């Protein structure tokens, strides 16, 4: 509840200012809003929500290791942790549709938790490969077991982002990066600037919970302001950055 009023205020501002498909002049963004982010979700991935519901009913407890800003509740019960912290169906559908639209080959996710969002990412494109990082050993093990059905398409690393990122970023050029798991504005800024030199042309960076707290909103606004002639999108839940030079800066607040 720490940042409830900030988030509520930001949501109200977003509702007033955001536009739909007819409020954008970018063909790419129009297509994204009009069709790409509204395609039907395949019944073949119903297993992801079924797994999430199974975990929600779990009474297993553990001593959490929180390397980020943490959730709004101090949760030590797996069921409550999954209920409050994992990708709900709408958020998962967003990730699935995003991957299906842009078909990234190399995906990097900061913040695996129990692997729900990772499963949506891997389901979006059968040729995508995912590297995902989780700080908590217990959650890492849960994710590893669940994601095993995807064979060798994922690499799940347990550790601190600050220690792991410098090691894995140079190993390839990334097509999609999801920054989640550390809800501090200073961390968002740091990771964003670390990642940029290792992106492919036309790669995307998706930043979760950009309006969760005042410092997250400030960090997001600074990224938008200082990223040059790039395309940035504000979906309220997500901030998106396209790593491609454009004739001029474009920024949209979008209703989704």
Image (cartoon, rainbow, N blue to C red):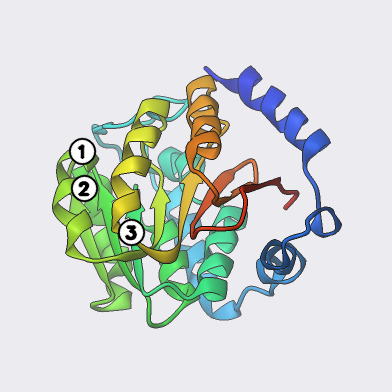
Disc with the residue nearer the chain's start (1 vs 3): 3
Residue 165, given in percent of the width and then of the height, sits at 21, 47
Q: Give yes or no for contact between labels 1 and 2 (Cβ–Cβ under 8 Å).
A: yes
Q: Dot 1 corresponds to which residue?
A: 162
Residue 218, given in percent of the width and then of the height, sits at 52, 25
- Which residue is at the far front? 247
Nearer-the-camera pick, 179 or 152: 179
Q: Quadrant of residue 100?
A: bottom right
Q: In which quarter of the image is residue 63?
A: top left
Nearer-the-camera pick, 74 or 188: 188
Residue at (44%, 45%) from the top-left corner? 82
Q: Report the Cα–Cα distance between label 1 and label 3.
A: 14 Å
Q: Dot 3 corresponds to which residue?
A: 108
Residue 99, given in percent of the width and then of the height, sits at 50, 69
Residue 112 shows up from this direction: no
Q: Give yes or no for contact between labels 2 and 3 (Cβ–Cβ under 8 Å).
A: no
Structural crowding at the residue carrying mark 1, measured as other residues with C-alpha within 10 Å and reported as few (<14), some (14–19) or many (≥20): few
Residue at (58%, 68%) from the top-left corner? 97
Residue at (79%, 36%) from the top-left corner? 17
Image quadrant in which the N terminus is located: top right
Q: Report the Cα–Cα distance between label 1 and label 2.
A: 6 Å
Task: Determine whether, in the image, residue 226 is placed left or right of residue 58.
Answer: right
- Looking at the rendered structure, the secondary structure element under dot 2 is helix
Q: In this view, does 84 lie above or below 169?
A: above
Structural crowding at the residue carrying mark 3, measured as other residues with C-alpha within 10 Å and reported as few (<14), some (14–19) or many (≥20): many
Q: Dot 2 corresponds to which residue?
A: 165
Q: Is residue 152 above or below residue 113?
A: below
- Looking at the rendered structure, the secondary structure element under dot 1 is helix
Disc with the residue nearer the chain's start (2 vs 3): 3
Residue 116, given in percent of the width and then of the height, sits at 43, 58
């Amino acid at each position: 509840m720490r940042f409830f009023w900030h988030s509520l205020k930001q949501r109200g501002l977003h509702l007033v200012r955001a536009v739909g498909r007819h409020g954008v002049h970018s063909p790419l963004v129009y297509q994204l809003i009009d069709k790409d982010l509204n395609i039907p979700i395949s019944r073949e991935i119903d297993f992801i929500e079924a797994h999430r519901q199974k975990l929600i009913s779990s009474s297993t407890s553990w001593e959490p290791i929180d390397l980020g800003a943490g959730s709004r509740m101090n949760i030590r019960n797996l069921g409550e942790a999954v209920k409050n912290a994992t990708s709900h169906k709408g958020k998962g559908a967003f990730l699935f549709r995003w991957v299906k639209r842009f078909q990234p080959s190399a995906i990097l996710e900061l913040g695996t938790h129990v692997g729900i969002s990772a499963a949506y990412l891997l389901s979006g494109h059968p040729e995508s490969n995912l590297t995902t990082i989780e700080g908590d050993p217990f959650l890492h093990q849960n994710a590893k077991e669940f994601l095993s059905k995807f064979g060798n398409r994922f690499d799940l690393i347990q550790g601190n982002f600050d220690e792991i990122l410098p090691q894995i970023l140079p190993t390839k050029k990334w097509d999609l990066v999801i920054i989640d798991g550390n809800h501090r504005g200073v961390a968002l800024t740091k990771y964003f600037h670390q990642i940029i030199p290792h992106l492919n042309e036309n790669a995307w960076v998706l930043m979760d919970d950009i309006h969760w707290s005042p410092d997250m909103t400030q960090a997001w606004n600074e990224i938008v302001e200082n990223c040059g002639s790039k395309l940035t999108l504000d979906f309220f839940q997500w901030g998106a950055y396209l790593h491609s030079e454009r004739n001029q800066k474009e920024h949209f607040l979008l209703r989704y």
